[in-house]
């Protein structure tokens, strides 16, 4: 494709700028790990755990190999197993549900709110049975689920909440941090998350000392004492290099979040000025939420894929989170869901589009994104 003179390149995410700015600090931190040979867990990871617990307002933070493993370990720590049900959302990344099914438990999907794309907590309340072992909301795209209402519902039924906070580090509900409100919070350091590592990584947070001890054991094959296995766990540790890199990045996280929020505000102004209210829905930010904008996801009722193609031709990167809802995935055919069962999740899969929102995005790049979107939608 030839790039015309007035064409701009706007990637969905540009990690290079962030990493280049921090390069000297990152190299020094990696050097410290090389010097100490602490490649698995070790001092950097231990320091990071303390800093992350503080950042998430939780008593404990326990590093592990990925966000997917964090969810799996959380379910294991709560004793989720065959015959149990776990209530969750059909509109999320695959790991949300595989953590449940890998333990032989049954995911019970509840539809989402059409404006926030988050789990509808009132619908979740109706799905609680004697077999419900946990409820697992996802703070999707960086905005918290209604944790106050969900906590009321789950406390009444004595059911623990596992927060899938993979996209929500630093997000808040009425002043409370994601990962501090449920029994266990699960985070990912996949490079595209707001706090991204240079490889896979994850962390679990909890205020419960017993769960913390169990999670610490489960990540090392269920051994709380070496070679003495109380449970069958996983080999799932955060490595020293990731710990060192993440410690360099964490002090910058709040500033990056503020830049993402400012970018979201700028999109709102630009889209309003372009007069596109009837053609595109912008993310809804509920009162009392600190939305950290891991993604800026808009809804276009028709021609979403054509718009995406047009923007790509103009040099603009976008993505669809998520094109197939979890209840319609081939591997879950055995659960018996049909198209039409969870209409809001299915509609979101057809209509949503993530636009670039990363911290270093420039105002003129956002102007370009909005101008090109308007050009397509108005013709
Ligand atoms: C990224 C993500 C995960 C999984 O994290 P990994 O570190 O990639 O395993 C889980 N849930 C959600 C909602 C995510 O966005």
Image (cartoon, rainbow, N blue to C red):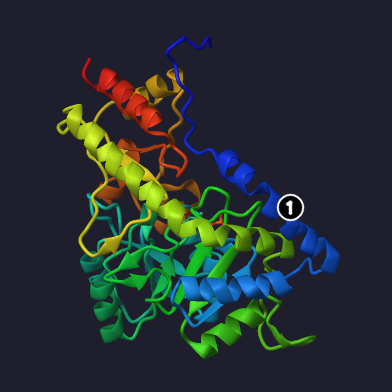
Quadrant in the rendering for residue 123: bottom left
Total numbered badges shown on the rendered structure: 1
User: Which residue appears at 39% of the width and 47% of the height?
Assistant: 260
Residue under pointer 1: 27
In the rendered image, residue 1, in percent from the top left (x then y), is placed at 53, 11
Q: Is residue 293 visible?
A: no
Mark 1 lies within 8 Å of ligand 1 (Cβ measured) = no
- Which quadrant is the C terminus positioned in? top left
Task: Please tell me whether residue 43 is drawn above or below residue 285 in the rendered image.
Answer: below
Residue 272 in percent (x, y) is at: 18, 34
Which is more toward the observer, 284 or 259? 259
Q: Which residue is at a point 47% across and 9% down the rendered structure image?
A: 4
| Viewer-side residue, 295 vs 302 | 295
The answer to whether residue 282 is above or below residue 132 is above
Which residue appears at 29% of the width and 52% of the height? 117
Of residues 318 and 94, the one drawn nearer to the viewer in this rendering: 318
Question: In the picture, residue 6 is in which quadrant?
Answer: top left
Q: Is residue 215 in sight in this rendering?
A: yes
Quadrant assignment, res 165: bottom left
Is residue 274 or residue 212 the one in the foreground? Answer: 274
């Amino acid at each position: 494709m030839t790039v015309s003179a007035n064409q701009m390149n706007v990637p969905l995410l540009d990690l290079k700028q962030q990493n280049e700015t921090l390069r000297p600090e990152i190299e020094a931190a990696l050097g410290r790990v090389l010097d100490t040979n602490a490649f698995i867990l070790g001092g950097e990871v231990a320091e990071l755990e303390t800093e992350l617990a503080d950042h998430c307002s939780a008593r404990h933070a326990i590093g592990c190999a990925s966000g997917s493993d964090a969810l799996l370990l959380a379910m294991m720590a709560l004793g989720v197993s065959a015959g149990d049900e776990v209530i969750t959302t059909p509109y999320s990344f695959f790991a949300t549900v595989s953590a449940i099914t890998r333990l032989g438990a049954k995911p019970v999907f509840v539809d989402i709110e059409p404006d926030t794309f988050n789990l509808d907590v009132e619908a979740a309340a109706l799905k609680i049975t004697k077999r419900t072992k946990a409820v697992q909301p996802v703070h999707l795209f960086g905005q918290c689920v209604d944790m106050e209402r969900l906590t009321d519902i789950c406390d009444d039924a004595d059911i623990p909440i596992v927060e899938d906070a993979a996209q929500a580090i630093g997000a808040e509900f009425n002043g409370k941090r994601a990962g501090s409100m449920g029994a266990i919070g699960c985070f990912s350091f996949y490079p595209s998350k707001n706090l991204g590592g240079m490889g896979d990584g994850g962390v679990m947070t909890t205020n419960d000392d017993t769960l913390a001890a169990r999670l610490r054991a489960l990540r090392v094959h269920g051994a709380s004492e070496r070679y003495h296995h109380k449970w069958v766990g996983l080999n799932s540790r955060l490595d020293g290099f990731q710990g060192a890199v993440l410690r360099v990045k964490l002090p910058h996280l709040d500033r990056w979040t503020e830049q993402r929020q400012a970018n979201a505000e700028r999109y709102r102004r630009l889209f309003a000025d372009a007069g596109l209210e009837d053609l595109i829905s912008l993310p809804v930010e509920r009162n009392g939420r600190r939305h950290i904008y891991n993604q800026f996801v808009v809804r276009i009722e028709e021609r979403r894929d054509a718009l995406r193609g047009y923007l790509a031709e103009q040099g603009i990167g976008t993505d669809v989170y998520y094109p197939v809802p979890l209840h319609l995935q081939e591997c879950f055919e055995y659960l018996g869901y049909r198209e039409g069962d969870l209409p809001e999740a299915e509609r979101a899969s057809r209509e949503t589009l993530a636009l670039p929102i990363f911290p270093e995005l420039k105002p003129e790049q956002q102007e370009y994104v909005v101008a090109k979107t308007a050009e397509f939608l108005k013709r």
